[in-house]
Amino acid sequence: MRIVVAAKYVPDINTERGFRDCRVVRDAGEGTLNELDENAVEAALRLVEAERESGRIGPDDGEVVVVTMAGPDGDVALRKAFQLGVDRGIRVSDDTLAGSDYFGTAAVLAAAVRKLGEEAPVDLVVTGMAALDGLGSVVPTLLGAELGLPTLNLAKKVELAPAEGSERVLTITREIDDVTERLSGPLPAVLSVTDTANQPRFPGFKLIMAARSKEIEVWTPADLGLDPAAAGTAGARTETLSAAPRPERAEPEIVTDKGEGGVALADFLIRNDLV
């Protein structure tokens, strides 16, 4: 069982965010592994552990590889993934990738998965449900399209059926608009999990210490055989023309009701074209 987790380095949601050249500032001191991707890492680790416990693979078999597209600051996210227990971390990095949109990001990640597949078969690609810096939630679907694989999104529960012949079947349960769905698809596949799919494990001291010195592989678009026009600003289908902090909210108008509160409310609604 070989699983690739596509993860993202994002600004810490508890810090003040800023923009530079119409892009989100991503400084190592304020960035981290996308919190929702921790659920993806946990799902991947549990699937491999379940395969070992069942005897379908050996006790030393199975691998979880985390891939991120980021600058050198993105190593922070990979170190956190190592602390959780992943086996290998890869950062795809190059100045030409700056400004990539969702489609470019999916193209880069898909190219990395294909390169890993040349080393050994990849059974599953797992992602979180969204990245907290953009909340687009479309990369899992785009990644599945790029790879030409079945895509099972927004899983709350994940089950991997025992092998029947040469085909393994992945089944998920998800809840959308008060409807519970069960979907299945053969491996290899792309899977995204929600923040309710599991509770990410707490890093152990041994893994925390080991993560400090564990090797991070750095790949470039050239290593992936990626067309330069597929990502970065050259391949972006959208362009951000300006970016600025949200304006401060105006002070509220407080009216003390002395018998004419209804009139004041009606005036407010009319003045703001709310009626």
Image (cartoon, rainbow, N blue to C red):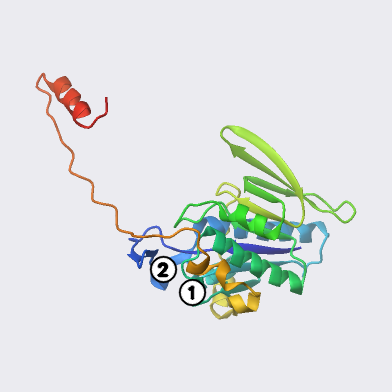
Q: Residue at x 64, y 73 (%)?
A: 88
The residue identified by callout 2 is 26
Question: 140 or 78: which is nearer to us?
Answer: 140
Helix, strand or loop under label 1:
loop
Does residue 243 appear in this view?
A: yes
Q: CB atoms at circles 1 and 2 under 8 Å apart?
A: yes
Q: Is residue 117 left or right of residue 128?
A: right
Where does the N terminus fall, quadrant-wise?
bottom right
Q: Residue at x 50, y 57 (%)?
A: 35
Q: Mark 1: which amino acid? A: Gly
Relative to 203, does residue 140 appear above or below in the rendering?
Answer: above
The residue identified by callout 1 is 71
Q: Position of residue 141 (x, y in %)?
A: 62, 52
Q: Position of residue 139 (x, y in %)?
A: 57, 56
Relative to 90, does residue 148 appear above or below in the rendering?
Answer: above
Question: 201 or 176: which is nearer to us?
Answer: 176
Where does the C terminus fall, quadrant-wise?
top left
